[in-house]
Image (cartoon, rainbow, N blue to C red):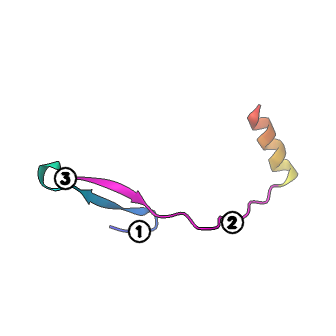
Amino acid sequence: MENRTGYYKTNLSGKMAYKSFVPSALPAVPPIVEMSEEMVSLLVKANY
């Protein structure tokens, strides 16, 4: 099953078989986050 988040891959075979989750790749260029003065102030308070 493949979707936006990733897919399960079957590893090995027979009694030793197991599945592992392979996540989809992240976008090459993440969007820019614009921070207001209020957000910066809240982040500073959270760091304390």
Q: Would you say 20 lies left or right of 38 here? A: left
Q: Which residue is mark 3?
A: 17
Q: Amino acid at mark 1?
A: Asn
Amino acid tagged 3: Ala
Above or below — where is 39 with respect to 10? above
Quadrant (top left/top right/bottom left/bottom right) for the N terminus: bottom left
Image quadrant in which you'd find residue 12? bottom left
Instruction: Measure the alpha-carbon separation of dots 2 and 3.
Output: 39 Å
- Can you identify the residue that label 1 sits on? 3
In the rendered view, tell whether residue 35 sits above or below residue 42: below
Q: Which of pointers 3 and 1 lies earlier in the amino acid sequence?
A: 1
Nearest the viewer among 12 and 2 is 12
Quarter in which the C terminus is drawn = top right
SS type, badge 1 = loop
Q: Residue at x 39, y 58 (%)?
A: 22
Q: Residue furthest left?
A: 14
Disc marking residue 31: 2
Magenta part, dominant SS: loop
Q: Pointer 2: residues within 10 angstroms few (<14), some, or many (20+)?
A: few
Callout 2 amino acid? Pro
Identified at 74% across, 37% down, the residue is 46
Instruction: State the separation of the CA atoms marked 2 and 1.
Output: 22 Å
Q: Going by the image, does 20 lie left or right of 33?
A: left
* Along the line of sight, the residue nearer the viewer: 4 or 23: 23
Q: Earlier in the sequence, mark 2 or mark 1?
A: 1
Marks 2 and 3 in Cβ contact (< 8 Å): no
Q: Secondary structure at mark 3?
A: loop
Q: Residue furthest top?
A: 48
The stretch in magenta equals: 17-35
